[in-house]
Image (cartoon, rainbow, N blue to C red):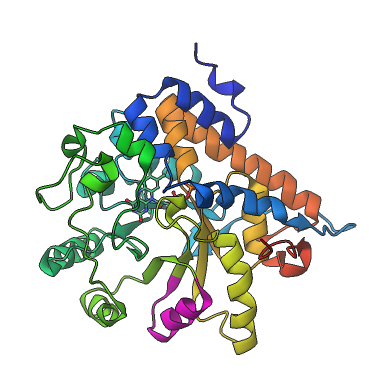
Amino acid sequence: TKPILEQCYNLMDFESVARKVMKKTAWAYYSSGADDEITMRENHSAYHKIWFRPRVLEDVSKIDFSTSMLGTKVDIPFYITATALGKLGHPEGEVVLTRAARKHNVIQMIPTLASCSFDELCDAREGDQVQWLQLYVNSKRDITKKIVQHAEKRGCKGLFITVDAPQLGRREKDMRSKFSDVGSNVQSSGGDQVDRSQGAARAISSFIDPALSWKDIPWFQSITKMPIILKGVQRVEDVIRAIESGVQGVVLSNHGGRQLDFARSGIEVLSEVMPVLRERGWEDRIEIYVDGGIRRATDIIKALCLGAKGVGIGRPFLFAMSAYGLPGVDRAMQLLKDEMEMNMRLIGCSSVSQLNPTLVDSRALNVH
Ligand code: FNR
């Protein structure tokens, strides 16, 4: 039997419950990584290589960990990143995440391949709630243009172009579970015929354009005023190129270990990127986000110390939603807020503006 929600004390707990209660095929799609899943494992364990150098005797009676991302004020420095096929985990799909995001004043990134329609997710917004759009670029650019301009019209505040998936990775767990009904779970892939023989991921991705290149960036800038963020950047050289292309942000990410196996963790890439930007005096020219393996508030704090503006969290909210619906996601976010308050206090910082590289010892990163 399923433990009661109050028995989930951290984000990992939702994963073990979800594993027991979810349909096998759905579990396989959410939990899988590419190939041997080395990158997926490293995403979280990379955070274990970073240790704190806390300050003492600072006044930490009041803690404020709110911040802003792309100009939007948020309660806590994470956003819900895009994860496709929400209805595999919960009959209502991604609207559950929209509601939890509202309650906790965090931003939701809407996936191109959401189970709910894009408009449904926009309609579920309340007040000044903010959403972003994650974009898979269709080789038929008129379809892409329509999606982007519609998103802007509906008030999306950021365009996250996924750049680490010219082809979807091989997720063997997912392939083995032999998906047959993915078509009914996707609303917005543009209606193209799909190949369903190789698991959910590959089935829904056949429209993605592998010819997408740096040359296309000016075109995106010409069709939208939304800030553009490249999701899935993995090396310093490409961060520099992103800055030179005039985009507003990058997400240092390996797609949750679902694409290139042996891609490095976002946090490790971050530790390499920031010193180079600081040396050039470029650290304010772009907002840097990190995702992959973030499960604890200490992970969030470490990323911010090393220079991230915020972090994306994916699977934990999917698992919380699948196991317990909205109350599960609500609790997952509240747990992160509670952990955040305590750990900010324990490292001697009362606001995120005080987080800086001297508060961590990250020498063990980039050693393999
Ligand atoms: C993803 N991710 C993803 N990314 C993207 O750009 N478009 C997408 O459609 C999806 N879909 C998707 C589905 C599922 C089930 C997962 C787990 C992930 C990647 C996602 O945005 C993010 O990079 C990682 O999920 C972050 O890692 P964690 O937090 O899941 O460890």
Q: Nearer the viewer, residue 57 or 200?
A: 200
Residue 345 lies, in percent from the top left, at: 77, 50
Q: Main secondary structure of the magenta part?
A: helix
Left or right: where does residue 362 sit relative to residue 161? right
Against 102, is 351 above or below?
below
Residue that appears at 59% across and 22% down: 6
Residue that appears at 19% across and 32% down: 180
Residue 338 lies, in percent from the top left, at: 66, 40
Residue 272 lies, in percent from the top left, at: 61, 73
Against 342, is 88 above or below?
above
The magenta span reads 235-249
Residue that appears at 23% across and 52% down: 205
Residue 167 lies, in percent from the top left, at: 28, 59
Whether residue 149 is in magenta: the answer is: no
Q: Nearer the viewer, residue 149 or 104?
A: 149
Against 367, is 110 above or below?
above
Whether residue 244 is in magenta: the answer is: yes
In the rendered image, is residue 308 in sight?
A: no
In the rendered image, is residue 358 in sight?
A: yes
